[in-house]
Image: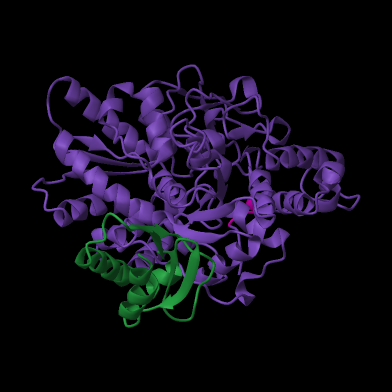
Chain colours: A green, B purple
Amino acid sequence: MIIQICIGSSCHLKGSYELVEKFKAAIEAHDLDAEITLAGSFCTGKCNREGVTVIIDDETYTGITPESFKEFFREKVLVKI
Amino acid sequence: MRKFDTKVQHLKYQVLKEVAKEAWDDTLLRNFLNIPKIIVPGDEPTMRCCINKERAILAERVKMAMGGNRENPNNIEVLPMACDKCPASGYEVVADSCRNCLAHSCEESCKFGAVYFDRDHRAHIDKDKCKNCGQCAQSCSFSAIVKRERPCMKACKVKAISAEGGKSASIDNSKCIQCGACVYKCPFGAITDKSYILNVIDMLKKSAQGKGRVYAVVAPAIYSQFKHAKLGQVVAGLKALGFHTVVEAALGGDMVALKESRELSEKGFLTTSCCPAFVSYIKSQVPDMLPYVSHNFSPMVEMSKFIKQTDSEARVVFIGPCTAKKGEAKLEASKPYVDEVLTFEELQALFDSRDIELEKLPEDVLDNASYYGRIFARSGGVSEAAAQALREQNIDFEAKPLVCNGIEECMKALLVASKKLKAGQMPEYNFIEGMACLGGCINGAGCLTHSEVKNKMEVDKYGKEAMEKSIKDAVDAVVI
């Protein structure tokens, strides 16, 4: 699974750095290093009012925040692995 | 608010704008010969002796806007027809101003016996004896002695321009560092930089058809430019032109700062490599110093490389104040990463060719780099960033920078350092920061407005607005 987190200016200002850290920690905690490739991407053109854009394989999700991260990771990452 | 410093810049801009307009409409090949007439439509000349010469010179400018002479690898070229062949005779007595005085301080001050007097006691300078030291001019109480030199030759500190026999200026490509100082200083606009604006329009058009995504990598000097609008509006304008997104070259600066400081601590002596004109000078004039030039890419190339690693469809256009970057982008090492280079002047023409009024656009955002990456744009910035990067990486090495502001200071420093290093001695500094333009990139030839002091303040202010306070934070946020 390839997870791309938007690191463009807009998402950067909305906390993409914090989200990257959360992804890294969650991947480690669930021992998914071998299954998941984490990468950055400059602007997907889907800038949202709130939160960060994340692309998982070919699916784009917008508005991910540190608060919604836990649920997002469970529903969109863990169940698919 | 005035967009440019000089009318010469404005003329170049008008040409670029018209060329771009036709290119967007796919009518350039049919209409490019009409552009001079669009700019000077009337029967009366507006700048030169006759309308025909004006239009003939404008036709040359159109050629430069379309990429210029491809046979000539230099991105800076003389338009011989536009050159006014300014006098370059050195020190001369201005007849009206010489008061035929008794003191003859000019004669006293001249160590070479070059000043003589005619029957009316008026001073003259013997060209065969004169060494151009300027003492006579300083000594004259009436300021009656002036130095006649061509503004282009005066601007060119590396002495790449000659004007033998009173001819049009010519550039020695083996000495030219493409800094563009002559381009900005020639009052006739007779030396100009080639534009690759057509390649950029082509990329943007293809991208609109779904072929590739065009990224704009903007130099931090941009903060002191386009002051008729906010930076966020410039970003919005770039997206309105069709750029996929806008990334700060300053983030490349942050990446370079981390690597270059490590390289400095390993090698013990280093010069910067971010200014292509400075590197070009070392290559051609002080090759002994080449081993000491940082092997790191410039922030432009570093950033472009990073973008291409994250997106295989990416095309990268660097937008900055620099004419020398046009040359750097064509080097074998940079070619795979940087697809094209635009100056701020050219960007303004591109905006106006699409009638994009920045002031009316909503504000977009631009934030990836730290303070330190951003201050690469001004003299002293790279040195500050390198020292900070050593601290952040806990490297126990003291950087002793020598900040060389402008190519003249660089030339002196390189000469001294090369002599010392050859003799096995270590200079009292271990890091030469070389910037060819006075003040740094903020005063580059491709700027819309030039001001060493004001532009530095603007860039420092922009640096302090960065969300990330340290270099590592800025880099860690993107290098996942």
- Residue drawn at x 44%, y 44% as measured from the top left: B141
Q: In the figure, B226 relative to B113: above or below?
A: below
Q: Is residue B396 left or right of residue B175?
A: left
* Residue A44: image location, x then y, percent: 51, 64
Is residue B222 in view from this perspective? yes
Q: Is residue A67 left or right of residue B426?
A: right
* Residue A73: image location, x then y, percent: 33, 73
Q: In the figure, A10 relative to B381: above or below?
A: below
* Residue B349: image location, x then y, percent: 66, 56
Q: Quadrant of residue B268?
A: top left
Locate the C terminus of chain B and report the quarter of the image it occupies.
bottom left
User: Most extreme residue toward the top, as rendered?
Assistant: B128
Is residue B466 in view from this perspective? no
Answer whether residue B187 is magenta in the image. no
Q: In the figure, B398 relative to B71: above or below?
A: below
Which one is nearer the viewer's eye here, B60 or B69? B69
User: Most extreme residue toward the left, as rendered?
Assistant: B396
- Residue drawn at x 71%, y 36% as measured from the top left: B82
Answer whether residue B8 is magenta in the image. yes
Which one is nearer the viewer's eye here, B53 or B429? B429
Q: Is residue B109 left or right of residue B339?
A: left
- Residue drawn at x 36%, y 40% as measured from the top left: B297
The segment highlighted magenta reads B5-9
Which one is nearer the viewer's eye here, B201 or A4? A4
Q: Is residue B353 left or right of residue B426?
A: right
The secondary structure that dominates the magenta segment is helix
Q: Quadrant of residue A74?
A: bottom left
Locate the N terminus of chain B and report the quarter of the image it occupies.
bottom right
Q: How many marks?
A: 0
User: Most extreme residue toward the right, as rendered?
Assistant: B43
* Residue B439: image location, x then y, percent: 38, 51
- Residue drawn at x 50%, y 50% as measured from the top left: B321
